[in-house]
Image: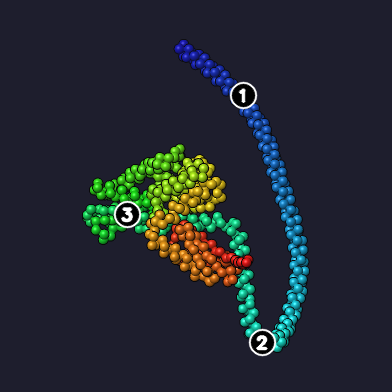
Amino acid sequence: MEPYILILIGALIGGGSFFMGWSLNARSGQNKIMDAQERAKKIIEEAEKEATTAKREKLLEVKDEWYQKKKEFESDTQSKRSKLQAYEKQLSNREENLEKKLDLLTKKDSTLQTAGKEIADRQKRLIEQEKELERLVEEENLRLEKMAGINREEAKKYLYQNLIETVKSEATQTLKDIRDTTKLTAKKEAQKTIVQAIQRSAVDFTLETTVSVLNVGTDEMKGRIIGREGRNIRAFEAATGIDVIVDDTPEAVILSGFDPFRREVARVSLERLIADGRIHPARIEEVVEKVKKELEEEVVHTGENTLLEIGLHGAHPEIIKHIGRMKYRSSYGQNLLEHSIEVAYLTGIMASELGLDPVLGKRAGLLHDIGKTIDKSVEGPHALLGYELCKKFNEHAIVCNAVGSHHEDIPMEHPISALVQAADSISGARPGARRESVEEYIKRLEKLENIAKSFNGVINTYAIQAGREVRVIVSHEKLDDAAADQLSHDIANKIEQEMEYPGQIKVVVVREFRSVSIAK
């Protein structure tokens, strides 16, 4: 029984312990719940406070934004209202202006209608007056016919003849006055045209100065020069600027071109290609370029040798090149370098005889036609081009003036300028200087005199200065001074139309009255 008691006691003790533990645990859990509820309550209160604060802040932000939007809206509305008011004011002003213009147009229309009526009335009165005037003129004409004893047609004929004579006389005098006035300003322009067209271009070349004939050995070589489908000859012409004429001439081709330097380049190049045997576009270009360089060097040597020959020194290298190029320039068959050397010697001799500086004379004579060596694409008379070239390379002022004035493009400032002009005329105008035979020279002079004699009132004519001037003696009874002035221009125009000649020809008409009495 004791075990049961012990068990019961143990059970009681254990139950008590359990109950005590459960009781303690229950109290502890209730305390935690209460703490949790308090904390939850505090959290809720804090959350409500925060929510209230956030709500107030949001409400403030919304209010600020609303006020800002309201302010912008009011500002925009005010701006648009101001613009509308300005537009309304402009429209009002325009309406006022339109009303004023309408009133003005109405007044003008009324004025125009009144003026139109006045014009119509005036036209009507003028028509009536014209009819009355015609009637009066007709009556006056009939009265004059009766008084004069001739009819209207005869009177017209007499009046027409008298009018023609009067108009001729007045027209001749007017032309003389116009020429006298324009001579002062037109001389340079006329010289530019004449000198540029005749002295520089020199288009009237003879056959020997425009073509070169080259012996090719065999006709088979002609085919090689032409090449397949003509490619070799096209390449050669493009490289040299010279036309190659391959015709029926046996064993020969013709090189044609107005530039003697290019023609010489073409001739030498073709000779080397034939000797080499390799004829194709690439080889053609190579040989032509090489020959050009060699001839350019030869040009410089020619210029230097010419200066040494004449006894001059100290020229600019570019001037020396231009002197050398004279060798490949000709005018009317006369070689420019030979002509310039001749003019240099003549000028130097005359300068020495007159006590002037012969060195300056020779230098001016040698360079007087240097403008002809400038590329023809540059416009202007060769004298002025040479003048600018000499000034550019610091030639003496006397030399520059002589070069520019030898065709009177600028005034002469020194006696040497006149000597250069005289020497140029001597060298260029003498018979045979420009490949003109004596027979042709005489025929040209005779034709010049006959042209002048073909005009009415001419008594006699004389060609002087190797055909550079023609003197025309006219009758003082048939022609007055104005008619003589007109005659000189008519003769000059006819000479230009019917003759070919180097340089220019001066026409001088001489009219004079001589009265001779003998005292016994």
Cα–Cα span, label 1 and label 3: 133 Å
What is the three-letter code of the residue carrying label 2?
Ile
Q: Is residue 308 among the parts visible in the rendering?
A: yes
Determine which residue is flagged by label 3: 212
Please name the colour scheme applied to the rendered image: rainbow
Query: Horizontal placement of 126 versus 198: left or right?
Result: right
Name the amino acid type tagged 3: Ser
> Which circle marks residue 150 in the picture?
2
Q: Secondary structure at mark 2?
A: loop
Give the side of residue 506 with respect to residue 330, left or right: right
Which residue, given by chain and number where applicable, does mark 1 sit on? Answer: 35
Q: Position of residue 219 (x, y in %)?
A: 23, 56
Residue 134 quadrant: bottom right
Assign a secondary structure to mark 3. Answer: strand
Residue 321: x, y in percent?
42, 43
The answer to whether 31 is drawn above or below residue 65 in the figure is above
